[in-house]
């Protein structure tokens, strides 16, 4: 299973890419996310 992700490869170097997810286990729940937000500064919290 894959998902799209924002990848931080170095300081100030962001890219959009696909990453492999591990298969969910019997106690896991898979949730579909349609929208998400990223705002500058939250990485410092």
Image (cartoon, helix red, strand yellow):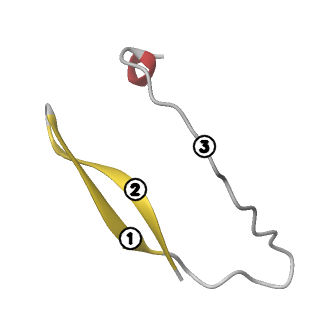
Q: Residue at x 80, y 72 (%)?
A: 28
**Seen from this angle, which residue lies furthest right?**
27
Counting from the top left corner in percent of width and height, residue 26 is at 85, 85
- How many neighbours does mark 3 have within 10 angstroms: few (below 14), some (14-19), or many (20 or more)? few
Q: Position of residue 45 (x, y in %)?
A: 48, 16
Secondary structure, mark 1, is: strand
10 Å crowding of disc 2: few (<14), some (14-19), many (20+): few
The numbered dot on residue 19 is 1
Which comes before the other along the chain, label 3 or label 1? 1
Task: Give the total of numbered labels.
Answer: 3
Judging depth in this view, the residue of 21 and 16 nearest the camera is 16
Which residue occupies 63% across, 85% down?
Answer: 23
Residue 34 badge? none
**Residue identifier under label 2:** 5
Secondary structure beneath dot 2 equals strand
Is disc 2 in contact with disc 3, using a CB cutoff of under 8 Å?
no
Q: Is residue 18 above or below residue 16?
A: below
Q: Secondary structure at mark 3?
A: loop
Q: Which residue is mark 3?
A: 35
In primary-sequence order, the first of circles 2 and 3 is: 2
Q: Is residue 1 left or right of residue 41?
A: right
Q: Where is residue 33 drawn, in percent x and y?
A: 66, 53
For residue 17, side relative to residue 33 (left or right) = left
Q: Residue at x 42, y 62 (%)?
A: 4
- Residue 16, located in which quarter of the rendered image? bottom left
């Amino acid at each position: 299973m894959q998902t799209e992700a924002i990848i931080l490869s170095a300081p100030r170097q962001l890219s959009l890419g696909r990453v492999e997810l591990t298969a969910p286990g019997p106690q896991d729940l898979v949730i579909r996310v349609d929208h998400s937000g990223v705002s500058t500064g939250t990485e410092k919290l």
